[in-house]
Amino acid sequence: MRNALAVLGFVLSVAPVLADDISAGKALAELNCHRCHALGDAGESPFKEAPPFRTLHEYFEEGELEQAFNEGMVVAHPAMPQWVMTSDQARQLAAFIMSFGPPKPH
């Protein structure tokens, strides 16, 4: 019972931080990504080749997207601008994108 309470306490203490990261990541996406990517639960991306953010979680395992952002993600098309993110921005943008659903299974 103590272990369960400890885990519950940890989850509840981390939840506001995750919500803050998701909110900050959404703000970053609205500022930097909205011209090309659909950012919401529905709708097409303004730039046809840019995948909607709501689908990106399907391609990454837990932690993989943040790591890719931190390493300077390289994409296959030249229209994607290079954005050197801080580690906080990488965590926040990844949290927003991954909030659309579960990560890709291992």
Image: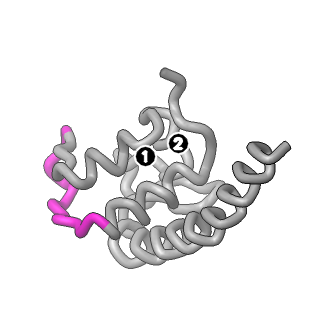
Q: Are marks 2 and 1 in contact (CB under 8 Å)?
A: yes
Judge whether 28 appears above or below 79 on screen: below
Residue 43 pos. (x, y %): 60, 56
Outermost residue on the top side: it is 106
Q: Residues within 10 Å of mark 2 (few under 14, many from 20)?
A: some
Residue at x 19%, y 38% (from the top left corner): 76
Which quadrant does the N terminus fall into? Answer: top right
Residue at x 36%, y 40% (from the top left corner): 64
- Disc 2 from disc 1: Cα separation: 7 Å
* Magenta span of residues: 76-87
Residue 55 pos. (x, y %): 53, 42
Q: Which residue is mark 1?
A: 51
Dividing the picture into quadrants, the one containing residue 35 is: bottom left
Q: Looking at numbered disc 1 in the image, what kind of residue is underneath it?
A: Pro
Residue 71 pos. (x, y %): 18, 49
Judge whether 66 appears above or below 92 on screen: above
Disc marking residue 55: 2
Q: Nearer the viewer, residue 26 or 76?
A: 26
Query: Is 29 situated left or right of 17 in this image?
Result: left
Q: Looking at numbered disc 2 in the image, what kind of residue is underneath it?
A: Thr
